Amino acid sequence: MERSSGVAFLSVFFPVFALMFSPVAAAEESASTSTAAASAQSAQDKTKSPLRKMLNMPDALTIGASASITSSKGQTDYDSRTYVVEASWTTTKNIISTYNQIQRSETGPQVLSDKKSSDNFWQYNFSQRYYLLSGYRYSTDEIQLVDKEHEVFLAPGFYPYRSQTCRLSTAAGALYLSQDYSETAILAGEDAHEESWRYGAYEAFDCALMGGVLSLSQSVIYSQNKDDSDDYRYRSMISAAVPMAYGLSVSVSYNVSYDNQPKFGVDKKQADLTTALSYKF
């Protein structure tokens, strides 16, 4: 469960003071509100992509693509080129998203991995506080020892904090992991196939600051084998994104992945610094 990507997770009560204002104050407030709304609409039109306006896309649907360069530090230092296509449909009750990426990692002339993955999520909000999160993740890498991975998870969650601009979400549940190994791994003594049931936990925070000029996000995904407490791993991410104009934005993210029982040839800990250029419409 990644990216964006993370992918992807509110009680605010506004008292009503309308009867306390005099007609003059109400008129001034109305004029101020109209001016603020016009300014907000102008800012929104500036950042909205021309393609979105041309296709008359509904506000609930968002589609994006990005290209990034990643510098990784671990047992082996390497650079990666990553290409992402994502889409999401967001309503009051439902959030459906897909995050698909191709990542090629290399050090000098040697190709370390050629990974393709797809993260798909569905979130159903029971209320402003509670939700149900489910997802399916598929990844493949013909160079790594773990050739294919499938993850299916289901987790109830809630928002400890949620406002119009920021939210903190958590979830905990069950995760099924299936792994198919490459011929090289099988010759080295690995089983052709391995599967396990795991405990899963998720935490994420995202916030739009300065009227949306800066977006911050952070997430942690943790899983542990229910039959082996020493078999656990996690992925964490923190990122900052700055929208430019007409759907374009730049972002910087720092990602850490850790596997307490990695397979032969796989780093136990890997840290990535990624710079990306994105276009969303």
Image (tube, rainbow, N blue to C red):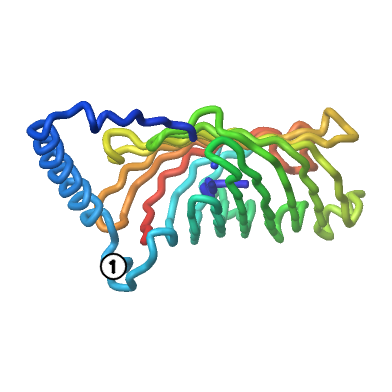
Q: Nearer the viewer, residue 265 or 150?
A: 150
Image coordinates of residue 87 in percent, x first then y, are 49, 60
| Residue lying at 50% horizontally and 54% vertically, measured from the top left | 82
Q: Which residue carries the number 1 mark? A: 53
Q: Locate residue 52, reporting x and y percent.
A: 32, 66
Disc 1 secondary structure class: helix
Is residue 11 shown left or right of residue 194? left
Rendered residue at 18%/52% (across/down): 42
Q: Is 209 positioned to the left or the right of 123 in the image?
A: left
For badge 1, the amino acid type reads: Lys
The x and y percentages for residue 196 are 86, 45
Question: Toward the viewer: 275 or 12?
Answer: 12
Q: Position of residue 114 (x, y in %)?
A: 62, 58
Q: How packed is label 1: few (under 14 Cα within 10 Å), some, or many (20 or more)? A: few
In the figure, residue 156 lies in which quadrant?
A: top right
Residue 187 visible in the picture: yes
Residue at image location 36% in from the left, 37% down from the top: 208
Which image quadrant is residue 164 in? top left
